[in-house]
Amino acid sequence: MTDRTILVVGTYDTKDEELTYLREVIEGQGGAVLSMDVSVLGDPTQPTDYSKHQVADAGGHSIKEAIDGDDENLAMQIMAKGAARLAVQLHREGQFDGVIVLGGTMGTDLALDLCAALPLGVPKYIVSTVSFSALIPPERLAADVQMLLWAGGLYGLNSVCKASLSQAAGAVLGAARAVEPPRRDRPLIGMTSFGKTVLRYMVALKPALEERGFEVAVFHATGMGGRAFESLAAEGAFAAVMDFAPQEVGNHLMGSNISAGADRMTAAGRNGTPQIVAPGCYDLVDFVGWQDVPPKLAGQEVHAHNRLLSSVMMTAEQRREMAREMCSKLASAKGPSVLILPEQGGNEWDRPGGPLCDPEGLAAFVEEIKLRCPDNLRLISMDAHINDTAFTDMVLEVFDAWRAEGVIAV
């Protein structure tokens, strides 16, 4: 008897031995395996559960088309498209409980598409010779993907690469057994924030929203957190969003590598999800602390948060640019949208006397928001700070009005 089934994906023409080893480890631990071949030129030594022809067909192409194109990049994109679509179909049918993909740069390129296509909560493991490298852009990572470095695994089995492969096989099977997928028994509110030192609204809002019958998920807006937030918003997972930490918008705008991508602050609007927005930490640009300051921010004041993360204070003109970017993104929102603007500041450090206090910069941001606010966005300007009780009271007032009007339902 087996309790969980793992989809094992790879190029069986070149990595048959390694993929077979993964199968043996998973089955040896009591799991079952479905195999998917994403090869183009060659064939596996034994038939797989899903052949390369089925994979190509699932994407609307054929193996002949992939070969005749005489372009390995095009061929792998054909296979990536088909593998992602086929994996989604198989998961919807309940055919597997977790997935593991094996590869070098070619296989990893495909693996990123396949994992990104599957919903959050499905265990996703990529075993790659380029795991954690700069080759992998954050925006292509699924919100809950796991990666292991395939050490010593470029060609053939050996004791070094078996250590990586066996860990990965045990990890994906263990995750499939232990995972508690997101429930759908209560409407979900998606909220963005940072730690309680700098932003505190979630401390009051989370229990207040839970008392109203909602579940609250708070996302750490440091690049990957924003990716997860946008991914779920794109799926329509949220009954409403409270996007109060748009710093990733500024990070991307100012050239930081700590980015949630160009589409940050757009998914909820595209879906018509009701959204309340506020400018928490709008005035800071995060960057990788052990790298040089982005060229656009050279010479500006830097605050080192830790050895991994530092922040640059925006100038008044950069804050105006941030205000314009936020308004531009929100202008296309299809659903009810409110921007609450606390005119006394957007993080604990910018209060009068605080280390990042800049009244002129704050005034410039506030002025630009009022000037550029699009017609579809209701602007609520407050003589308060984002960490004041008055801010959370206003959020709940807007939220409760939407509930009363039937915009949001329990």
Image: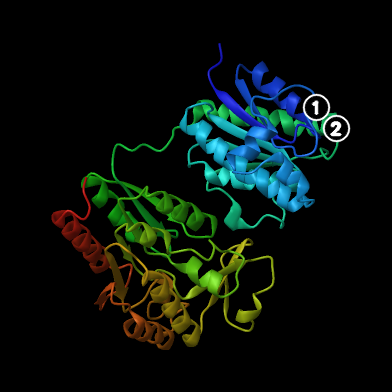
Q: Residues within 10 Å of mark 1 (few under 14, many from 20)?
A: some
Left or right, 355 with reference to 244: right
Give the side of residue 273 with respect to residue 151, left or right: left
Three-letter amino acid code of the residue under disc 2: Gly
Give above or below for 316 relative to 210: below
* Residue appearing at x 42%, y 63% in the figure: 266
Q: Is residue 62 above or below residue 207?
A: above
Screen quadrant of the C terminus: top left
Question: Mark 2 — residue?
Answer: 156
Mark linked to residue 17: 1
Q: Is residue 114 left or right of residue 390?
A: right
Q: Amino acid at mark 1?
A: Glu
At 28% from the left and 55% from the top, the residue drawn is 205
Out of 332 and 221, give the one closest to the viewer.
Answer: 332
- Tell me if I can see residue 130 in this picture: no
> The N terminus appears in which quarter of the rendering?
top right
Single out the residue that lies furthest toward the top.
1
Distance of label 1 from label 2 (alpha carbons): 7 Å
